[in-house]
Amino acid sequence: MPDEKNEFRVELYVKFLYPGIILKGDAYTYAGDKVWDGGSPFTNEIIQSLKGRGISKVFYTRSKLSQKRDPKNPMVSDEQIKKSVDISREIEQAVTSKSIIPEKGVNEVVDGFINNISSSEGTVLNLLELKEYDDYTYTHSINVCLLSILFAKKMNYNEKGLKIVGIGALLHDIGKQMISKEILNKPFNLTREEFEIMKKHPIYGYELIRSQSSYGTLIQKVVLLHHEKYIGKGYPFGLRGEQIGEIAQIVSLADNFDAITSERVYKPARPYWYALSTIKKESGTSFAPRLARAFVEDMPKYLTEAEIFTKGGFVVLNTGEVGEVIDYRFPQSLKPVVNIFINSKKEIVRYPIPVNLEFDDSRTIENVLEDEGILKRLREIKEKITSKKEKSPYNPVLDPEIVKTVEEKVEETKEIPPTIIEEAQKLDQVQIDKDLFIDNETDLK
Ligand SMILES: [Fe+2]
Ligand SMILES: [Fe+2]
C-alpha cells in the first residue's frame, strides 16, 4: 500500500545500527539534530556516541522507491489485500494464543488471490510496501504468497497446485512468530546463539502447522523446506536438488525476491534489477537453474510497469565495459541496448559502440552506477566522444577513480550476500522423517 506522497519517515533503533550501514537519507534525532549523512556508512564511533548520549532512535525521510508498486492496472483487488492483512493478524493471534490457525480465512484469501491472478491479462502484480516495520511479517508473507501463486501459474500449476503453493507461501514464516523481534530485526550481526534460534523458524512453523491446522504434508513441506538450497547448504536439513522439490523452491524464489526488494530496519529496498541479478547468480547454488531462469525471464513483465534499467542510466557489464542504456524493446527488459563508452581495458573508446544485449549472450549487466561524482564524469566523457566538434577525442586514459569504481562494481554483485547458512552451526537433531517430504509432488500441474 503505497504512501500518498511517496515519502515518509523511517525510524531506526540505535541498537540495530551497525558500522557500515548506509541509510538512504540523512539521519536525525527526534530533537531535530542531524547526526549522519545519508549515503555514507555509519562508523562505530558515531553509533557509540549516540548510545552514550542515551539516544535510542533516529530517523530519516525516505524518498520514493525506484520501482513503483502501485501499477495502473493492479492484478489483485484492494478488497482481497485488505482481507489478507486481516487474516495475517488472525494467524498471529492464533500462534500467540496457541489456538487453531484460521484455515477457512486462509483458504478464502488464497482462493481470492488465485482468482485475481488467473484473470489478470494485461495487469501488473501490486505488491505491498510496508509503512511500519512491525507490519513486515504481514506484508512479506502476503507478497511471497502473491509472487508464488503468480510464478506457479506461469509454471503451469493446476488449481490444486496453486492452492498448496499459495497457502504454504502465506504461512512460510509463521514460525518466526515464535522468535523475539529483537532477533528478527538484526540478522546481520546476530550472535551464534541468535543464529541458531533464527534458523529454527522453519521447524517451529512446521510444528505449528502440524499441531494447529489440518493442512497436509505438502503445505508442511513448503514451510519446512523454504530455506533449503539447491546445492545442499540450506537449513534445516541441507537437502539437495530434487530432494527439495519444486514447491518449496518456488516459495524460496519469491521469498528472496521480496526480501531483497523490501526495505527493512537494517537495509534499504534494493531495485528489481538487483534482485533479479542476485537470483541469476544464485542459480545452481540456492535455486534449481531451470526455476531461477524461468523466474528471471518470465516474471518481470508481471511485476512492474517501470523500466528495469532506466534509459540514460550508466551500467557496468560483466566484461567490465561501461555504457549508457539507450533503448529497449520492453521497459521490463533485462537486456536493453547499451552504448559502450569505456571498454574492458578501461579505455575510453573512440566512438560509442551500441550493443543490443538481446542478441549478445556474452554480455550481461552486472551493476548500475549511482555515485553522482562518477556519473558527472561519465556524462562529460560521453559528451566528449559523441560531440562532433572535437577532431581527435580519443583519450584512452581513464581516471583511476572510475577504474576503481567499475572494478568494484563488477565484483560487488558477484558476491553472494552473507547468509545465515554459512555461519550457523548444525541444528539440534530434530525428529522429522525427511522421506515424508520427498517425491510427493504429483498432480500439481
Ligand atoms: Fe523464512
Ligand atoms: Fe520469508
Image (spheres, rainbow, N blue to C red):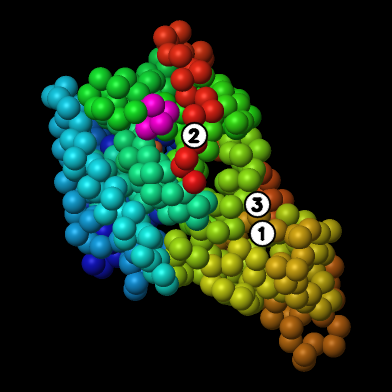
Which mark, by number, is residue 365? 1
Q: Residue 88 location, x and y as percent?
A: 22, 41
- Residue 23 percent coordinates (x, y): 40, 49
For marks 3 and 1, give the CA distance: 11 Å
Residue 12, compared with residue 311, is above or below; it is above
Query: CA–CA distance between discs 1 and 2?
Result: 36 Å
In the image, is residue 386 above or below residue 277? below
The disc labelled 3 sits on which kind of residue? Lys
Looking at the figure, which quarter contains the N terminus? bottom left
- Residue sitting at 47 percent across and 49 percent down? 157
Res 409 label:
3
Residues in magenta, as a range: 217-221
Magenta stretch, overall SS? helix
On the picture, is 203 further left or further right than 328?
left
Mark 2 belongs to which amino acid? Glu
Tell me the mark number nearer the camera, choosing from 1 and 2.
2
Q: Residue, x 69% and y 55% (percent of image)?
A: 406
| Mark 1 residue type | Ile
Q: Which element carries disc 3, helix, strand or loop?
A: helix
* Front-most of residues 375 and 63: 63
Disc 2 designates what residue?
441
Q: Residue at x 42, y 9 (%)?
A: 431
Q: In the visual, does 152 lie left or right of 383?
A: left
Q: For label 2, count other residues whose C-alpha is less than 10 Å away and answer few (under 14), some (14-19) or many (20+).
A: few
